[in-house]
Amino acid sequence: MNFKIVHNNINVLSLDKSLKFYEEALGLREVRRKAASDGSFIIVFIANENAGHQIELTWLRDKKEPYNLGDNEFHIAFKVDDYDAAHKMHEAMGCICYENHDMGLYFINDPDGYWIEIIPYR
C-alpha cells in the first residue's frame, strides 16, 4: 500500500482576499474549484508548478466569525530559492509574524491568521 499526501485544507472567511494573498505571497494559483449547487460552500485548490501538493481553501457561506485557531501550533512550510528577496517582499506586505534568526527562518500569516513557515534551500 502506498500513500501520497495531496492537499491540506484551511477554511477562509474571504475567498477573494485569500486567493490574492496566496498568489502574491507564495505564487500559488487556482488549480480547480468546486461550488455547492445551493451556494453554501466553495472549495478552491491552489498550487504552483514546483510541487504536487495543493492547499484547499474552503469558504463557507454561513461562517461570519473568524475561525478559532487555538494556539495556532500548526503551519504549512515552504522552501524558497531566494530567501532574502522573499523576506523583503513579505516585509513590504506586512505579513511577517515571527522570525527565528538562529534557525534562519520566519513565518508569515495569511488573512485568517494561519501561519506559513518560510525556509531557505540549504
Image: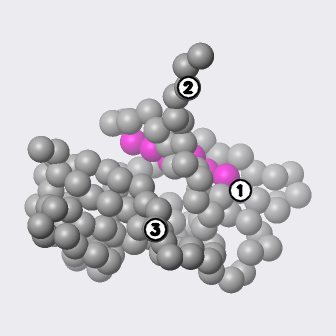
The residue identified by callout 2 is 3
Q: Is residue 111 above or below residue 35?
A: below
Point out the image quarter for the C terminus.
Answer: top left
Specify the amino acid type for callout 2.
Phe
**Callout 2: few (<14), some (14-19), or many (20+) C-alpha neighbours within 10 Å?**
few
Which sits earlier in the primary sequence, circle 3 or circle 1? 1
Q: Is residue 5 above or below residue 26?
A: above
Q: Is residue 56 above or below residue 12?
A: above
Which residue: 41% across, 50% down? Answer: 28
Point out the image quarter for the N terminus.
Answer: top right
Q: CA distance from mark 3 to mark 1?
A: 26 Å
Q: Which residues are magenta?
A: 43-48
* Colour scheme: one colour
The residue identified by callout 3 is 73
The residue closer to the viewer here, 103 or 122, is 103
Specify the amino acid type for callout 1.
Ile
**Callout 3: few (<14), some (14-19), or many (20+) C-alpha neighbours within 10 Å?**
few
Specify the amino acid type for callout 3.
Glu
Left or right: 60, with 114 as reference point:
right
Quadrant location of residue 40? bottom right
